[in-house]
Image (cartoon, coloured by chain):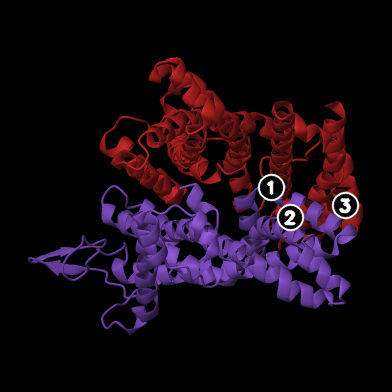
Amino acid sequence: MPSDKYLPKNKKLQKLLQTANTETDSLYKDAWHRLKKDKLAMIGLIVIAALVLIAVVAHLIPGLDPEGIESSRQVAGKTIFPPYAPSAQNWMGTDQLGRDIMARVFYGIRVSLLVGVIARGLTMLIGVSLGVAAAYFGGWVDMLLMRLTDIFLALPVMLLAMIITLIMGPSLTTVCVALVVVGWPDVTRLIRGQAMILKNKDYVRASKTLGASGFWIITRQILPNCLSLIIVSFSMGIPGAIMYESGLSFFGFGIRPPSPSLGNMIADARGYMTVSPWYILYPGIALILIVVAFNILGDGLNDALDPYAKYRK
Amino acid sequence: MTSYIIRRLLILIPVILGLTLVVFLLVNVLPGDTARLIAGEYADEATVENIRVQMGLDQPILVQYGRYLGDLLKGDLGRSYQTHRPIANEIRAVFPKTIQLAITTEIIGLVIGVLLGMAAALRHGKALDRFISMFGVLGLSMPQFWFALVLQLLLSVKLGLLPPSGYKLGFDLYIILPSLTLGIPTAGWMSRVARSAFLEVLPQNFIRAGYAKGLSRNTMVWKHTLKNTMIPVISLVGTDMSRLLTGTMIVESVFVWPGIGKYGLDALLMKDMPALQATVIVLALSICLVNLIVDVLYAVVDPRIRYK
């Protein structure tokens, strides 16, 4: 090409020009390529996939009974009482009623994943809608929503969640509702910021001039450009939701026994801490595993979806 | 400067009003007949009705709210259903203990976190860096109650080094376990922030100029880079303080540290409405206060913000 005569004529550049992949796909395909290269994020993804697999097939595995009580057992001629130490029969030991901890941990993982994803998903739904509404409609709608987020952000989070679960009675749905009430202000603020920047961009203004409806602009122009922010916020909010759920269950405000939840298992384990360390160890490790995996994945997603990230690594 | 503060305070007023309304409504929606709670299970209907009228519980909710607001402005937080003592006094007794815990935690988190972050940044990409980053993620991911119990088990029960729970005036061994439980995750999180702050400062020109001038590595690292990375870190300390002041419930409960977190939790468990209400409002007000202070400090440090 005629403009090439100003390029340096060395072999390195020639080779680069020949072998370089100049095709770029959409932002998401590029982000996926970048994510695949990030080893840590891939580990997180694999761990999460494994945990989801466990959660899904838990009830299909024969012999895995999270609620089977065993009040005494004969070992080597002697009668022993629960909690039983880890053995061939119970790989992670049992709790104080003789229930298999591994089974309960698996079911607990399932509950944690469910609550994390559903609660955060609902939070995103509400937060994104309100954020976009605040940004797009502006004026008193924006003012009202901002004051509302200020109020909710000033309230102590854990206490608020506990009060809500007390009002509604402890259950999985209550925990989800509490998490949404506590989590929506952050998302709303985040999306509102981004939507405000987008609202003032030329292509949005052009569409408006050409007569596009608000609905069209929001769904076809603003929301798609918030998508990476939404994805990152969603994945980084899941570990927080899971920790809150386990915290609530620990105090008895969330999921109550005998339903297994990693939080209420740790609460029960408290009384047997000194004699049965496995009881408190395994649910804790499972919880940490889930949260670390999501954190790592979220970090990786953040770096992959942010076009300027490679300059900051 | 003052106009900035005044503007912030003016915005704060409707927020605080809204806060009191939300909290009041929330707490008074809880099921349970409060008049009966005070009268006791065996009181007869007349007594319960008497108490109800006396406390103004038969008035419409908005009237009750108005009275509550009036009391708040006078500084009267009501009386606890459980201990029948003025709540304001009780909170005045427990809040400083939480503040003590929060400050100790923040110091631990800051010192350890910044040092680790610095070490990680100076050996960027090497094994130590990755190890410290993993520690940071781990610190973020540990459930507080689990970590508290594990520390209690290890340091108190198995090794017998520290008392497992309780409180003593001043800085004694009793504060170590709770502040470690809160401090280590804080340190982990802060090390990540400090690390990225350091990584941003290190390649800058004035650092190179310092080395070119001939300053020793020690001087460069400790004097020049550290000071410049403190700005983002310190602003985060502010927001972290509000998180710490209001999120100590779990740790205080496990270690029986008589702070406001435990007070609120106990009030919730005992269905002690006025105490719960007062706790939430006090905590919310302190969050607002801390945010205000942080914003003002921001404006002091960065003059551009004052004129927005």
The answer to whether residue B300 is left or right of residue B241 is right
Residues at circles 1 and 2 in contact by the CB criterion of under 8 Å: yes
The residue pinned by badge 3 equals B64
Distance from the alpha carbon under mark 1 to that under mark 3: 16 Å
Q: Residues within 10 Å of mark 3 (few under 14, many from 20)?
A: some
What color was chain B assigned in the picture?
Answer: red
User: Number of labelled discs?
Assistant: 3
Task: Please state which amino acid type lies under the numbered disc 3.
Answer: Gln
Determine if residue A301 is in view: yes
Nearest to N terminus: mark 1 or mark 2: 2
Judging depth in this view, the residue of B110 and B196 nearest the camera is B196
Dot 2: within a 10 Å radius of its alpha carbon, few (fewer than 14), some, or many (20 or more) residues? Answer: many
Q: Quadrant of the N terminus of chain B?
A: top right
- The residue identified by callout 2 is B27
> Label 1: few (<14), some or many (≥20) within 10 Å?
many
Between discs 3 and 2, the one toward the N terminus = 2
Could you tell whether B173 is left or right of A237 in the image?
Answer: left
Q: Which chain gets the purple colouring?
A: A
Q: Residue at x 57, y 42 (%)?
A: B262
Q: Which residue in the protein does label 1 denote?
A: B276
Task: Write down the chain letter for disc 3.
Answer: B
The chain containing the residue under callout 1 comes to B
- Residue drawn at 66 percent across, 59 percent down: A187
Q: Nearer the viewer, residue A81 or A121?
A: A121
